[in-house]
Amino acid sequence: MYEYNKGNYVMKTLYIDCSAGVSGDMLLRALVEISGCEADLEGLHLHHEHDHDHGHGHDHEHGHDHGRSYEDVKHIIGHAAQHGVSENACRFAENIYAVIAKAEASVHGMTLETVHFHEVGRDQAIKNAIGIGMALDRLGFGADPMKSAGRILVSPIYDGKGFVDCAHGRIPVPVPAVRAMMDACEGAEGPGRGYDFRTAEDVDTEMVTPSGLAGIIGIGARPAERGFAIMGKITAEAEAKGTRDTGRGGLRVYLIEE
């Protein structure tokens, strides 16, 4: 858990501040900025040899075209590992999609074998998950905590309230897949245990997306202790704003050496 640097052992901490919510795109952009892996991500091309393109997806943001199965997504990530992407980066992406698959299966009464993804199954969404893994790999964090250069902590996670419009009509916030992930975190022994979910009473829209919360859980972020304050040296920081103007700024990420 410690990295040797110039004669000293330093602990790396990646702190993710979700007081303005979190989406998969916000998390990706913030991590890419502090890791400097833009070029690697631009060179990432997905392979679809096992893509069967059948069934219907269930993301709340878009329409009713065909989606990808969980198996299709896992095959695409697996091919990335065979074409220059590190196994560690792909493991992060696999962990993120495992969270998404369980939530979607729960919402729609399906199994992991029958669940299909719509928006979160598209090329860009898969590339985002792999990109998150690539950034963390570049920073020295491991999908296996025992092989990581440090720890990943997350602040209380704020979502809005009210309703959001989607292809299926108006749905309540937190949206169903996010609610399923929250429920799965209750009493969980593994990833997601102890997260502090809060409601921003002044925000009447969605602040947490399924890909965003799945990203936080899937990368193994642990809840920061109550009253957490940054005590070490901040070596990099970034802020990534979402597409909705909530008046709360963006997702903030800090790389700290202690």
Image: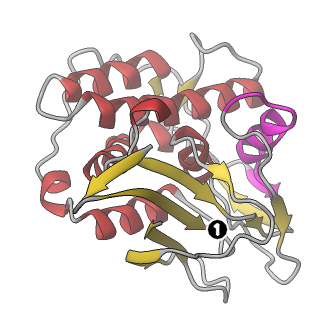
Establish if 181 lies above or below 66. below
Q: In which quarter of the image is residue 32?
A: bottom left
Q: Mark 1 points at which residue?
A: 18
Q: Where is residue 153 in the image (x, y as percent from the top left)?
A: 60, 56
Q: Tell me the residue at 37%/66% (across/down).
A: 29
Establish if 86 lies above or below 130. above
Residue density around tag 1, few if under 14, some if 14–19, many if 20 or more, within 10 Å: many
Camera-nearest residue between 57 and 9: 9
Q: Is residue 188 magenta?
A: yes
Residue range of the region highlighted in magenta in the rendering: 169-190
Q: Is residue 166 magenta?
A: no
Q: Position of residue 33 (x, y in %)?
A: 30, 70
Side of 133 where 227 appears, left or right = right
Amino acid type for the residue under numbered disc 1: Cys
SS at badge 1: loop
Side of 101 where 42 appears, left or right = left
Q: Where is residue 94 in the image (x, y as percent from the top left)?
A: 43, 28
